Structures are given as C-alpha cells and as structure tokens.
Image (tube, grey):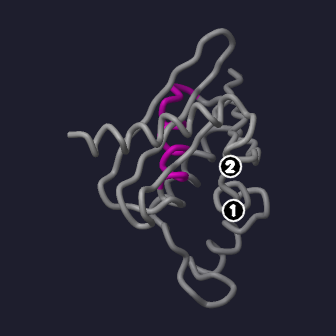
C-alpha cells in the first residue's frame, strides 16, 4: 500500500467570511500542492475541506499520515467523537446537533477507503509544511479579494 503524507490547513477572513484551504501531499520524492476558496464559510469548514480535497486526490487506497493544526478535526477522529455522533444520530452529548455533518460524512467515507493516521501539529510554528499550507489557504483568500 502506498504511503502518503498530507499536511492541511484552513483559513477564514472573519468567521464566517471568505475562506481558503490548502494541502500538500507527499509520496516518496513527489509532492503536490492544492488549494481552494469559498466566498462564505467558517474556519472549521475550511480545515475539513482541506483534508477532504487532499484525500480525494488519492487514486487508490493509501496509508496516510494526515497532519493538521485543527484540534476540531484531529480530535474528532483520535478521540472517537465521530463514533458517538453517528451512534446518537448526529447529536452531540449536550443534545445539540453536530455542525458540518455534510463534511463529516464525506470524511467518514474517505477514511473508509484509506488508512488514515491523524496527527495534530502546532499551528503558526516551525513546521515547514503546515506553514506552507497556511500560505496556500490565506493566499487563496487574498487572490479572490484582489479580483
């Protein structure tokens, strides 16, 4: 099984507001950068979208180490929040509905295809690839602001 390292980040100018996401996929000596923009969104949606878009780039099942500075995203998998949400029909333990269900469902589908290990990284620190993803995400917003 191919091993792929993915770094992701999302950004939002205002929350909600215009948003961008970025990802870097690394497999062996090859790497690929992707990014995108949404006119009205939230930071959490952009963090999730970055992971979705990166995983969708994979052509066949892979073993993935996905790095994100989003506790919301990483903890949902590593702390098994998602299993509880599904068990309770997308209601959190405090009885509020789970936000971003559409994106969580896409992530569940994609993690069923790939073996994903979720790794939390410190944002805006010395992590080269996280910083690059941040630049891609904020760059996507700036590019649309200039148009």
Q: Nearer the viewer, residue 129 or 64?
A: 129
Residue at the limit of the structure toward the front, as seen here: 146
SS majority, magenta: helix
Q: Is residue 100 above or below residue 53?
A: below
Q: x, y (%) of residue 130?
A: 65, 36
* Residue denoted by label 2: 69
Q: Do the residues bearing badges 2 and 1 touch, measured as CB atoms within 8 Å?
A: no
Extreme top residue here?
29
Q: Nearer the viewer, mark 2 or mark 1?
A: 2
> Which residue corresponds to the image point at 76% horizontal and 64% vertical from the top-left?
80
The secondary element bearing badge 2 is classed as loop
Q: For this view, does 106 lie left or right of residue 84? A: left
Q: Quadrant of the C terminus?
A: top left
The quarter of the image holding the N terminus is top right
According to the picture, the residue beneath numbered tag 1 turns out to be: 76
- Image: magenta residue range: 46-60
Within the image, what quadrant is residue 16 found in?
Answer: bottom left
Q: Where in the figure is residue 90, as x and y percent of width and height?
A: 56, 77
């Amino acid at each position: 099984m191919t091993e792929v390292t993915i770094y992701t980040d999302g950004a939002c100018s205002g929350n909600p507001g215009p948003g961008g996401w970025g990802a870097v996929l690394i497999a062996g000596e090859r790497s690929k950068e992707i990014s995108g923009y949404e006119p009205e969104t939230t930071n959490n949606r952009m963090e999730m979208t970055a992971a979705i878009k990166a995983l969708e780039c994979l052509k066949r099942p892979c073993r993935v180490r996905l790095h994100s500075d989003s506790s919301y995203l990483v903890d949902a998998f590593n702390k098994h929040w998602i299993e509880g949400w599904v068990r309770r029909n997308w209601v959190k333990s405090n009885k509020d509905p789970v936000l971003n269900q559409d994106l969580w469902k896409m992530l569940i589908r994609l993690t069923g295809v790939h073996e994903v290990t979720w790794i939390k990284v410190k944002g805006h620190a010395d992590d080269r690839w996280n910083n690059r993803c941040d630049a891609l995400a904020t760059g996507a917003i700036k590019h649309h602001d200039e148009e």
